[in-house]
Image: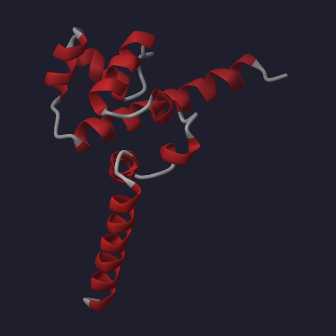
Amino acid sequence: MKSSAIVHDDDDVERRRLGERLRDSRKYLGLKQEEVAQYLKIPRTALTDIENGQRKVEAIELSRLAKLYRQPVGYFTGEDKTTSELPVDVAHLARRAADLSTQDRAELGKFAEYLRSRSRASR
């Protein structure tokens, strides 16, 4: 059984990770803290504290942020391992690609290969 000090440390680490994912998603979408705070109806300083891992996030706030940032809640909590370990822009691209037809995804794959080979050639 874990001691309460270890559990507390684990909570702090998880809260910081959650805050980092939220901040990265907000920045990726080009949103300002003030805009997101207004959307959540909380002070901007509260959002700053969330993103710094210094404030717990209410479930409803997390749900609203997931909707705003177009990410599943599991991405932010780390429960969705397939996307939580990806950079935010790649995870966003993967979710957008999932909505494409099989043919369009194949075309996207070819384009990604083209970009990769172009990048290698320019080195």
Residue, x 14% and y 22% (percent of image)? 34
Q: Is residue 106 above or below residue 114?
A: above
Q: Is residue 5 above or below residue 104?
A: above
Quarter of the image holding residue 50?
top left
- From the image, which quarter does the C terminus lie in? bottom left
Q: Nearer the viewer, residue 53 or 65?
A: 65
Count of all numbered marks drawn on residues in the image = 0
Is 68 situated left or right of 91 in this image? left
- From the image, which quarter does the N terminus lie in? top right
Q: Nearer the viewer, residue 18 or 9?
A: 18
Residue 38 screen position, x and y as percent: 16, 14
Q: Is residue 95 above or below residue 3?
A: below
Q: Nearer the viewer, residue 97 or 117?
A: 97
Residue, x 33% and y 18% (percent of image)? 64
Residue, x 36% and y 14% (percent of image)? 61
Residue 82 screen position, x and y as percent: 55, 47
Residue 105 screen position, x and y as percent: 37, 60
Residue 67 screen position, x and y as percent: 32, 25
